[in-house]
Amino acid sequence: MTHNSENPLFQSPDNNNHQPPTEAQRALELETRLPMTGWQQEVSKGIEYGLEAAQSIRDRTIPTFSRGELPHYAGINTFLKAPYLEDVRQVGNYDVAIVGVPHDSGTTYRPGTRFGPQGIRRISALYTPYNFELGIDLREQITICDVGDIFTIPANNEKSFDQISKGVAHVFSSGAFPIILGGDHSIGFPTVRGVCRHLGDKKVGIIHFDRHVDTQETDLDERMHTCPWFHATNMKNAPAKNLVQLGIGGWQVPRNGVKVCRDRATNILTVTDIVEMGLDAAAEFAIQRATDGTDCVYISFDIDCIDAGFVPGTGWPEPGGLLPREALSLLGKIVQKVPVCGLEVVEVSPPYDISDITSLMATRVICDTMAHLVLSGQLPRKEKPAYIHPESQPELVAWT
Ligand SMILES: [Mn+2]
């Protein structure tokens, strides 16, 4: 163990030994560049709507009724306490729209992901909009709304899929960046179908974090959560050659799904592949395959890509997955370098969760993605991305 005076981590940034600054030193500097305007507006609105605090309260930024971020244990649980947008026709006025999809009828083992959006929203109240290392303050840099949930039909996957596609298409075409809170992974097909409705002849690559391939045609005689990519890659807008599958492996990968991946030449990396090639090379692999000939990239993040020990509240836990910091780092490297058109986080099942840890991981994935979209200049959106076209029906691929 080095003495503090010899450890570069403990030396001041203005030392003369030409050491590059540590991440922490950089973070301290970055914070000084962030405005406080959003926070000041939130305080003024809080006092106006929530009334001035009682006379004994010395901090006069505190209102009588909790409004906005503080205190973290209070308030109505939208995601990050973003404003609830009751009138979804106004969604295009925001940079980001949070959309809950409380659907678990596509589940083949543990149910409960219909409570995923509630679980994620509840624990998201723990977060501030600021991230230290990234030097990002979402409240200062983008506008977020929570449009609530899609009305799903629990007795009928196909009707739910139609509702999900219609809802996602609406948000996507408005120009707001859609962030979807699942829900089981069966929603991956209707979410991508919703995006494809507004792509015209443009194409989308899919980057899929998961322990499972999810490429069966049917499971238990229906289109379940093991099936989204079979059907998504049947659409001409979502070619299978641009489907990247990260973290696949273990004892829950059905052989008929493996055959589909082989036949359609999807791009798979196992956890060992990712660890041995390194996160930079794995990110490059994903970026290259997902963007080859496409116009945008959709990210589908199954929380079970992370080792089961960190995400107990999920439908099909599988040990041996990515460590949280590996998954978050890989995600960040990818988001920084591709034109992302949407994000879904699926398979969070709060009834099986412990201390909200799985929901918290989902919150982290979402907040990190928003931060990297800001850092890479993708948010806030100055104009609607060029890949968004008027409505058209996706055509199907004829597989031989
Ligand atoms: Mn999975």
Image: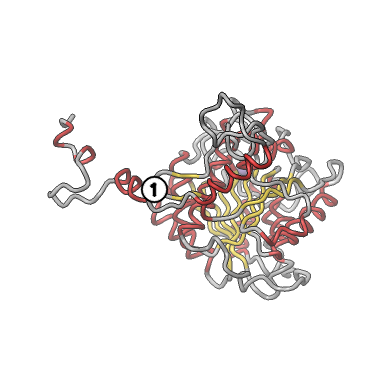
Residue denoted by label 1: 31
Question: Measuring 59% from the left and 45% from the top, which residue is drawn there?
Answer: 42
Tell me, yes or no, if residue 289 can be seen here.
yes
- Pick the quarter of the image with the C terminus: bottom right
Question: Measuring 52% from the left and 44% from the top, which residue is drawn there?
Answer: 129
Q: Quadrant of residue 237?
A: bottom right
Front one among 389 and 212: 389
Tell me if residue 76 comes above or below residue 85 in the rendering.
Answer: above
Tell me if residue 387 comes above or below residue 344 in the rendering.
Answer: below
User: In the figure, is residue 59 to the left or right of 229?
Assistant: left
Find ligand 1 in the image and state its quadrant: top right
Q: Position of residue 350 (x, y in %)?
A: 67, 31
Front one among 51 and 330: 51
Question: Measuring 48% from the left and 65% from the top, which residue is drawn there?
Answer: 288
Q: Classify mark 1: helix, strand or loop.
A: helix
Tell me if residue 52 comes above or below residue 161 in the rendering.
Answer: above
Tell me if residue 77 comes above or below residue 167 in the rendering.
Answer: above
Q: Quadrant of residue 169?
A: bottom right
Q: Position of residue 366 (x, y in %)?
A: 57, 47
Q: Give the amino acid at mark 1.
A: Glu
As drawn, the residue found furthest toward the top would be 56
Q: Position of residue 381 (x, y in %)?
A: 57, 64
